[in-house]
Image: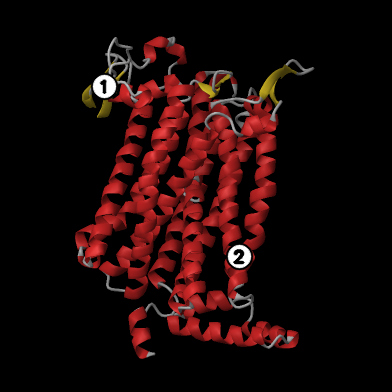
Amino acid sequence: MNLDVVMLSRIQFALTLMFHYIFPPLTIGLGVLMVIIEAIWIKTSDPSYKAMSLFWTKLFAINFALGVATGIVMEFQFGTNWATYSRYVGDIFGSALAAEAIFAFFLESGFLAVLVFGWDRVKPKTHFFATCMVALGAIFSSIWITVANSWQQTPSGYHVVRTAQGFYRAEVTDFWQMVFNPSMVHRVLHVWLGAFILGALFALSIGSYYLLKNKHTVFAQRTVKISLIYAAVCSITMLVSGHFQADAVAKNQPVKLAALEGHYTTGSGGTPMYICGWPSDKDKDVKCGLAIPGMLSFLVYQDFNKPVAGLDKVVPEDRPPVWLTFQSYHLMVALGMAFIGMTVLGLLYLKLGTLYRQRWLLWIYVLSVLGGYAANEGGWIAAEVGRQPWVVYGLLRTKDGVSKAIGSEHVISSMILFGIVYTFLFFVWVWVMNHRIQAGPPEVARVAAEHAEQAATLMKKDPFAVIASLLKRGPSSLSDSWRDSPPEHVEKIEDAK
């Protein structure tokens, strides 16, 4: 075993995880958006909101499917690349992942068929319930994954035992203490808000694109309005969440905080907070840094003059890589502040009634989804790299968690294979999503007619009539409706009506 195998295994897991994480936060964010839009439809009975719900449901289903497929690969890597680590945390992760399967996956997948195919088969309130359950299942899934990851950051509710074979492993002594470990609540809220922001920016991007192209104007204006409010509320809340998250890191992982802030040497006075810069391990300083004097001391201790512990408080082998931790963290923070600024500005223009004429701002909104992805990925990079050299903080080093039976050639070959498959999946995802977006939402007139037919059938309370209606429409009615609907302007359809 050599360091190359450890580093290659880390890179492989990082790449597969980052690719997988394209999909789960988007499904979580879109799930909440679908609940909001469908609730408005239930309240107003406006068929244009049902058309919006149909559109977002299709995009949600695509991302859900890819999220499930790419998540399986990571679980295999626990056994292939990280067998020692898996044996050590098996009792902890086993309970958390089992809870995810019971409380999240079955709930989410059980109602997914009703969400996607049940529009003309169940009553609107029943379908809305299914939508809520799918969104709730996606959120529950993120809870248990974050519980497992948070335990790695701040272990609690366990003891370490030695097996008959001479291996050490952590076992749960208090399940709820393990679940509610010191960093769990703050991390879960932070993950949720990141996903909500990404979902909101994704919808905002599509709505703004339609407005710039003068397509589906009514749909686009309503999408921009709803998603802009959604994004603004979550972005401002994220600022508060980030502060409490940083407080938890300062308390539980002071070495990680020092790496996040590029704080090499403990001083005698207040510690500055860097806005940007270039950390140098050689010079033990942040080059070309822009800093606010004493601000880090104030945020941690509410005292501008109390020093914060630096990286010099631990031996070099216990320090995380500073440059990548620092840059990914500051990228996340900078993008978060940008989201607040652009959404608050958009709300101001919305209040003045001029938002849809601000083409420069709409173009920023079109590109903002890339920032949403960068912020989510950057946050996870900062969290995971900042934990190094520990795979379980203070208990198991990363180099000791790698499987003993693999060599560098095995990891390289699998990385090449994953690279080919994931590149293919990425282009398929982009093509399918672009095709759905270019097609636009279904016709409002068609949706209204289908809804009226469904209501009439259900009101008959005749099981034979219901069965006949289902056989007439066939299982592919939803996809046929989408495929046959021309991407015309919603407002033109409404005017024709």
Q: In this view, does 198 lie above or below 295?
A: below
Which residue, given by chain and number where applicable, does mark 2 sit on? 129
Image check: 466 left or right of 28? right
For residue 88, the mark is none
At x 32%, y 52%, the residue is: 368
| Helix, strand or loop status at disc 1 | loop
Amino acid type of the residue that numbered disc 2 sits on in the rendered structure? Phe
Q: Earlier in the sequence, mark 2 or mark 1?
A: 2
Image check: 55 left or right of 371? right
Image mark count: 2
**Residue 216 is at least partly visible in this image:** no
Q: Is residue 49 above or below residue 17?
A: below
What is the x, y in percent for residue 59? 48, 63
| Helix, strand or loop status at disc 2 | helix
Q: Residues within 10 Å of mark 1 (few under 14, many from 20)?
A: many
What is the x, y in percent for residue 258? 37, 21
At x 41%, y 30%, the residue is: 246
What is the x, y in percent for residue 312? 37, 11
Identify which residue, 149 or 45, lies in the foreground: 45
Image check: 259 left or right of 157? left
Which residue, given by chain and number where applicable, does mark 1 sit on? 294
